[in-house]
Image (cartoon, coloured by chain):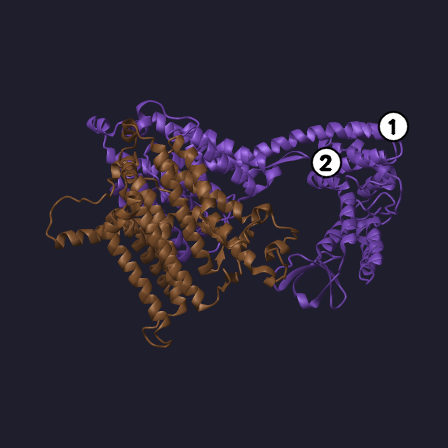
């Protein structure tokens, strides 16, 4: 860790005219100066600008040297200067966008994609139009400088009015505080209004105090789950002072305890997420296989169709991935449902009562659908964009953050499940489906058109597969093999849960997902999957009709 | 041993064996006696290809034995085939000796590559041909015994059995993909040099393997025919058509199922063992569920519950595959998929059913079908 030789305070977001600002170690003085400058007015600012630019140019010139240590000093100089543009320069330098033209001017590249780059003058901020990359020379940095730059920017940002910048800066400072920074930091903490920034800075300061051997700093670190805090406490445990070491050890133990709980929660979350994917993939199968008794090996390919519908929607609506995704929900359902109807009418109706033959025929359909996508679209994976409101994650604490896309899929799975339950339990169609399942002949004699019910049920199951595809497009690669990867798992879930039982499918899917995630850390992903498969194979031997077997006459069918 | 002799008195068996032996003899003569370049000459490549088809045919016969006569649709027979193949592959690996890339006297190349310092315990004995050949039958047989014992005892039948056999082969595929298993992981076992002292690269060895496969097919066929024709076979057919009724009559259905299942698995293993030296590689893709379903298609296309239909189906489909993948590889999956659909919908008795129908028509016989082809409804129960 580089201890940056910052004589406090640094260049702050001072107003344009802070020409008089000399580096000073006293924050109070700086604040005084700031208020002075604010009242100083614009006139003075105008007059001082020329001299300012000369000084600024000097600062930048110092960066354009070959030796990295010299560059490091130049960066410190920029930080210590009170130039308002310091932050822009530093972040441009960090991204490699601070460049020099052939005629010696310093420019900031705004967008370094393509051949022609739009640039602006680093000093005046005036746009200079586009320049070819050949006219520009980048000011190179190395990793040590990169670290130094990040810390320097963090310090500068600490005084920003922007809360997000202050938060990021506080994160960055954790473990980076040194003696020079410690004293002003205490003042900053007192003035800070945001609770999160304050807590973070307190921890940052406490780490420093712990390094100095202060026992009561441990109290400030106790609840934190941040890895840097653990590093600092571990170092304190190793230290010479037995009192500090004991206190640190105690804090560390409680943190470890807390961490284990959080890790458990994370595993549970990932397990539920995986489980929700399994439920989505299997729930359509639970309808076609469980309720109708039709083995549809092309189910996976119906999922694939749903995923490709999402992709196609996003192609139709470029620039609006979110809208496209929402529209794909009905579209994916329709596409898969229509494909399902075609399969039912084209093949399955001729194989009624011959489940093994149905299995073979639908497997043939799955091969055809896969190859259709391969030759018709591409054998390669397609990119489906995740809309902004679905990316990112929900940060609970330092050890636990929940990815949003998985959360949405989990919610979506539950909604689909609830919707399906409603259809089966509360609608005319559901009633008819259950009637036909239980006793086809009797249902027909009561005036139910069994063939129509068959078609609608199969369309419903297939449509749900399409919905699964829409959701899966947000989590995995969309390619011709997408369906194949899920078909065996889906059958396992349905059989494990008990055929013909939607609740069983839900419970089986979620629990298999969690079991898989629990096993993964010590068995590895592949072995965990094998163990789960073997477990299900053995489970079916024990209870051939699954977790929740159907009772009564329906069970004999 | 009259039960083993009976098949030879049957017309269909005589016909099948006659055709098979004639084909073996013909290919041998055309390969050896006809000079190269002559239009009738059969190249070593073709001999090799035919040998591969014959091993597939034996595998199909094994599947037909349990699907056609016992009503068990195994979607995992590729697993037994691959296990037999791996047993043979391990023997062939050990035969490489120090001629591998790394030149280690004992360890196969992939183990040297993984920095292993000794053979895993389950590799011991595979340097001896007799041990390996026993394992070819024993490994798949044992797996079938354990799996079948559990499954049949708890009366897992029909679709459920199909699904868990598929899960079985899927789990094995995942397992064999792991390097830690000690079976070469993703790449499997390959780079074989010789078998029983004969170089695998010589044409004579290839011809020998082709003939051996043909003989194995003949033996396997006769064995299956003997089982099917015996009283045991009739219990099997009864089980297929009405399992509960057979049980109520007093037969321990699960024992019959288990016995036939194990025999079928061992035949599949034998097929795999003959397949591996001819193609020169065995890798986990043989465990893939898709391959196992494909085997079922061969049987369905050829005609279930005829045994010779399985042979016809295996050879037809694989010949089509060779042609298609050579001419237009993209179309093969379309063709395969279409075959699945068309055969199940329009040709439930397969090519054999078609042949039998033609034969009957020629004889002007209008009586009902006497062949033991199962009726759909009961099988599903």
Q: Colour of chain B?
A: brown
Circle number at residue A226: 2
Q: Is B341 located above or below residue A256 in the figure?
A: below
Q: Residues within 10 Å of mark 1 (few under 14, many from 20)?
A: some
Q: Toward the viewer: B362 or A196?
A: B362
User: Can I make out residue A272 in this image?
Assistant: no
* Residue A465, disc: none
**Is residue B37 in view from this perspective?**
yes
Position of residue A89 measured from the top left corner of the image (x, y, whole percent): 75, 53
Q: How many marks?
A: 2
From what the image shows, is residue A64 above or below residue B179?
Answer: below
Give the number of the mark in front: 2 or 1: 1
Q: Return the residue at label 1.
A: A243
For the point 36% across and 59% down, which residue is it? Answer: B321
Residue A12 x, y percent position in the rendering: 79, 44
What is the distance, in whole Å, between disc 2 and disc 1 at their CAs?
23 Å
Report x, y in % for residue A181. 84, 40
Q: Identify by letter the chain in purple.
A: A
- Chain letter belonging to callout 2: A
Mark toward the start of the polypeptide (2 vs 1):
2
Residue placed at 46% from the left, 39% from the top? A489
Q: Secondary structure at mark 2?
A: loop
Residue A1 located left or right of residue A524: right
Looking at the image, residue B280 lies above or below residue A240: below
In the drawing, does residue B60 fall left or right of residue A391?
left
């Amino acid at each position: 860790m580089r201890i940056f030789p910052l004589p406090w305070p640094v260049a702050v977001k001072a107003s344009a005219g802070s020409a008089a600002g000399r580096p000073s170690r006293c924050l109070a003085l700086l604040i005084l100066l700031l208020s002075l400058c604010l009242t100083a007015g614009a006139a003075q600012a105008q007059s001082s600008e020329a001299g300012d630019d000369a000084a600024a140019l000097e600062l930048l010139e110092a960066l354009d040297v070959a030796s990295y240590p010299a560059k490091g000093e130049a960066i410190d100089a920029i930080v210590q200067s009170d130039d308002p543009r310091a932050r822009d320069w530093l972040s441009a330098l960090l991204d490699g966008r601070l460049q020099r033209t052939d005629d010696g001017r310093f420019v900031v590249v705004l967008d370094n994609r393509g051949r022609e780059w739009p640039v602006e003058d680093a000093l005046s901020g005036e746009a200079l139009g586009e320049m070819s990359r050949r006219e520009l020379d980048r000011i190179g940095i190395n990793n040590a400088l990169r670290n130094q730059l990040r810390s320097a920017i963090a310090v500068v940002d600490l005084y920003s009015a922007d809360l997000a910048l202050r938060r990021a800066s506080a994160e960055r400072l954790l473990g980076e505080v040194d003696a020079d920074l410690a004293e002003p930091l205490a003042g900053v903490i007192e003035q800070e209004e945001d609770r999160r920034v304050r807590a973070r800075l307190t921890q940052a300061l406490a780490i420093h105090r712990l390094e100095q051997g202060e026992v009561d700093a441990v109290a400030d670190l106790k609840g934190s789950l941040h890895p840097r805090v653990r590093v600092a406490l571990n170092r304190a445990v190793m230290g010479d002072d037995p009192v500090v070491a004991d206190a640190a050890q105690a804090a560390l133990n409680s943190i470890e305890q807390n961490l284990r709980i959080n890790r458990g929660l994370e595993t549970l979350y990932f397990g539920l997420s995986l489980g929700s994917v399994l439920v989505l993939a299997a729930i359509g199968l639970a309808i076609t296989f469980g309720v109708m008794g039709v083995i549809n090996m092309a189910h996976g390919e119906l999922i694939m169709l749903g995923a490709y519908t999402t992709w196609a929607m996003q192609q139709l609506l470029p620039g609006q991935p979110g809208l496209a995704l929402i529209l794909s929900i009905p579209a994916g359902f329709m596409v898969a449902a229509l494909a399902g109807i075609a399969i039912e009418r084209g093949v399955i109706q001729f194989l009624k009562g011959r489940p093994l033959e149905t299995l073979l025929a639908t497997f043939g359909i799955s091969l055809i659908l896969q190859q259709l996508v391969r030759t018709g679209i591409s054998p390669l994976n397609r990119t489906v964009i995740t809309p902004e409101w679905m990316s990112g994650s929900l940060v609970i604490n330092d050890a636990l953050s929940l990815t949003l896309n998985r959360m949405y899929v989990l919610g979506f799975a539950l909604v689909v499940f609830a919707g399906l339950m409603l259809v089966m339990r509360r609608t005319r169609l559901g009633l008819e489906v259950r009637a036909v399942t239980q006793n086809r002949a009797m249902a027909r004699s009561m005036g139910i058109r069994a063939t129509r019910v068959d078609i609608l049920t199969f369309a419903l199951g297939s449509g749900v597969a399409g919905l699964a595809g829409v959701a899966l497009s947000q989590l995995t690669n969309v390619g011709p093999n997408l369906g194949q990867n899920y078909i065996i798992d889906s059958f396992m879930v349905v059989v494990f849960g008990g055929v013909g039982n939607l609740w069983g499918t839900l419970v089986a899917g979620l629990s298999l997902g969690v079991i898989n995630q629990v096993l993964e850390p010590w068995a590895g992903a592949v072995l965990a999957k094998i163990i789960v498969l073997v477990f299900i194979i053995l489970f079916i031997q024990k209870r051939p009709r699954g977790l929740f077997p159907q009772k009564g006459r329906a069970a004999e069918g | 041993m009259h039960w083993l002799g009976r098949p030879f008195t049957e017309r269909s068996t005589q016909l099948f064996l006659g055709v098979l032996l004639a084909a073996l003899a013909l290919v041998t003569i055309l390969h050896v006696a006809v000079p190269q370049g002559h239009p009738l000459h059969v190249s070593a490549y073709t001999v090799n290809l035919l040998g591969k088809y014959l091993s597939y045919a034996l595998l199909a016969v094994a599947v037909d034995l349990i699907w056609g006569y016992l009503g068990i649709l195994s979607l995992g027979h590729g697993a037994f085939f691959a296990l037999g193949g791996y047993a043979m592959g391990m023997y062939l690996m050990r035969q490489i000796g120090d001629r591998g890339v790394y030149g280690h006297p004992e360890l196969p190349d992939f183990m040297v590559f993984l920095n292993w310092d000794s053979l895993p315990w389950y590799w011991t004995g595979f340097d001896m041909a007799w041990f390996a050949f026993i394992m070819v039958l024993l490994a798949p047989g044992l797996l079938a015994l354990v799996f079948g014992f559990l499954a049949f005892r708890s009366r897992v039948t029909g679709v459920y059995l199909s699904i868990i056999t598929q899960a079985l082969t899927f789990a094995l595929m995942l397992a064999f993909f792991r390097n830690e298993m000690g079976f070469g992981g993703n790449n499997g076992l390959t780079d074989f040099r010789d078998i029983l002292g004969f170089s695998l690269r010589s044409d004579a060895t290839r011809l020998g393997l082709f003939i051996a496969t043909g003989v194995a097919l003949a033996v396997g066929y006769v064995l299956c025919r003997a089982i099917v024709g015996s009283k045991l076979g009739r219990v099997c057919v009864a089980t297929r058509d009405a399992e509960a009724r057979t049980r109520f009559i007093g037969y321990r259905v699960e024992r019959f199922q288990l016995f036939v299942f194990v025999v079928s698995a061992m035949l599949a293993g034998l097929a795999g063992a003959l397949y591996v030296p001819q193609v020169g590689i065995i890798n986990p893709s043989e465990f893939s569920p898709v391959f196992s379903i494909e085997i079922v298609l061969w049987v369905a296309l050829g005609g279930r519950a005829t045994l010779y239909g399985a042979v016809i189906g295996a050879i037809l489909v694989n010949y089509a595959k060779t042609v298609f993948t050579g001419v237009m590889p993209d179309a093969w999956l379309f063709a395969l998929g279409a075959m699945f659909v068309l055969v199940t919908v329009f040709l439930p008795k397969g090519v054999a059913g078609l042949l039998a129908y033609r034969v009957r028509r020629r004889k002007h016989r209008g009586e009902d079908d006497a062949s033991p082809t199962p009726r759909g409804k009961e099988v599903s129960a």
